Image (tube, grey):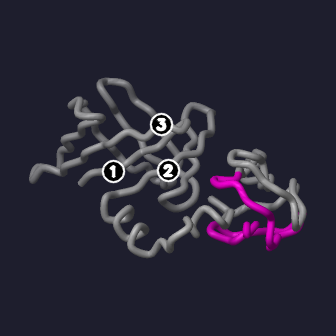
Amino acid sequence: MRYYVTLDGRERPVDVDILPTGALTVSVEGRLVEADVVEIDDGSLSIRIDGQVLDLTLEGLPPEVGIVASGHRIYGRIESERLRASAAARRTKGGADEKVIVAPMPGRVTKVLVAVGDEVAVGQGVVVVEAMKMENELRAKAGGVVAEIHAQAGATIEAGARLVTFA
């Protein structure tokens, strides 16, 4: 199965095949890597890639996920070919998916950085959400005008909750 992994704005194709023995064959950007994954009791993953071991915790649900590794948190996008094809089929003309900021994980809104009617640029901070005692600034994927704010500072939210809609 092919996956598209986007970290720090760079997309990398990752091919993962599960062999009949249960072993994995993994190729990142066409380069074969030695990999093994073990799920730990608390739901996190222990991954060995080319001899290096990383313990990862994933937050949220694909495609938008938070990844905690070695005490560092980054946000990325993980899409399977099937998920990408399904999203493309549902997407309406004009990039409707980019017009709504949704919570990537459950947490609490600590700040709303925009107001209805504000002009927002691509990459501009829109909402700050606290999850697991860390503040995470959610940024606009597309420019536009703020049409509606769905959550206020102090509100507790679930993963996938709509936070801000752009016109």
Q: Residue furthest front?
A: 93
Q: Quadrant of residue 166?
A: bottom right
Find out whether the residues at labels 3 and 2 contact each other: C-beta distance under 8 Å.
no
- Left or right: 67 in relation to 16: right
Amino acid at dot 2: Arg
Q: Are marks 2 and 1 in contact (CB under 8 Å)?
A: no
Residue 27: x, y in percent? Answer: 24, 37
- Local crowd size for mark 3, using a 10 Å CA cut-off: few (<14), some (14–19), many (≥20): few
Give the image quarter of residue 70: top right
Q: Secondary structure at mark 1?
A: strand
Picture disc at residue 3:
1
* Mark closest to the chain's N terminus, 3 or 1: 1
Whether residue 121 is in magenta: the answer is: no
Q: Which range is magenta?
A: 140-167
Q: Report the residue marked by disc 3.
A: 10
Q: Is residue 104 left or right of residue 45?
A: right
Q: Which quadrant holds the N terminus? A: bottom left
- Amino acid type indicated by mark 3: Arg
Point out the image quarter for the C terminus: bottom right
- Residue 86: give its label: none
- The residue that label 2 is drawn on is 77
Q: Residue at x 24, y 39 (%)?
A: 26
Estimate the x, y position of residue 96 in percent, counting from the top left.
58, 69
Q: Say which of marks 3 and 1 sits in front.
A: 3
**Residue 21: horizontal and vertical position, in percent?**
11, 49
Q: Position of residue 159 (x, y in %)?
A: 64, 66
- Residue shown at 69%/45% (left/top)? 123
Tell me if residue 15 comes above or below residue 1 in the rendering.
above
Give the spatial CA distance, label 3 vs label 1: 13 Å
- Does 153 lie within the magenta span? yes
The alpha-carbon separation of the residues under discs 2 and 1 comes to 10 Å
Three-letter amino acid code at disc 1? Tyr
